[in-house]
Amino acid sequence: MFCRPRHLLLVVIAALTLLGGCRDNPEVVFGHARDALASKDSEAFLALVDPPSRAFLTRSQDVVRLSGRTYEVLGAQGFAPDLLPKGDLVEDTQDGDYCIIATGNLCMVEVKKGRDRVRVPMRLIRGKWRIALIEMDPFLSAVLPR
């Protein structure tokens, strides 16, 4: 009689472990986002950013049109590849993954090109890593009025 609830508990724990293991790592999501930008697949890119960034970007075509093209980085014909930094991802030397800083549902993926390093914030949203684009300093600098 006591074996059944314990057995059920083990099955539930195993299922949750397997479900958690299906999530893409932050560096994989970042790579998919770069690919989507390169192929001008706006829908695929929007699926890889967090909800506040998605809301901002879905309005971006209106912003581009109304601003007299001041916000060109947002792209009138799809998003510009410059939305994400170019370069190689930096591996965390302590554990070998690509989260330089990870706390709860926040991960910072670092991109290095030459001497420049940019940290890309990623948030865990409903079990999936998503790019927090509007929290990234270079993005904010790019969309500020000139």
Image (cartoon, rainbow, N blue to C red):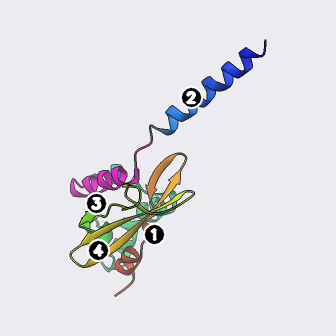
Q: Nearer the viewer, residue 111 or 145?
A: 111
Q: Residue at x 78, y 16 (%)?
A: 2
Q: CA distance from mark 4 to mark 3?
A: 10 Å
Q: CA distance from mark 2 to mark 1?
A: 36 Å
**141 and 97: which is toward the camera:** 97
Query: Which three-letter amino acid code belongs to the residue tagged 1?
Result: Ile
Q: Which residue is mark 2?
A: 14
What range is drawn magenta here?
23-43
Residue depth check, mark 3 versus mark 1: number of the one nearer the observer: 1
Please give the label number shown on residue 134.
1
* Discs 4/2, front: 2
Residue on which the image places disc 3: 78
Of the residues shown, which amino acid type is indicated by label 4? Glu
Residue assigned mark 4: 72
Q: Dividing the image into 4 quarters, which one contains the C terminus?
A: bottom left
On the image, the x and y values in percent for residue 32 come to 30, 50
Q: Is residue 144 above or below residue 50?
A: below
**Res. 55 mark:** none
User: Magenta span has 29?
Assistant: yes
Q: Residue at x 73, y 20 (%)?
A: 5
Query: Extreme front residue here?
Result: 94
Q: Earlier in the sequence, mark 4 or mark 3?
A: 4
Residue situated in front as seen by the camera: 67 or 21: 21
**Amino acid type of the residue that numbered disc 3 sits on in the rendered structure:** Gly
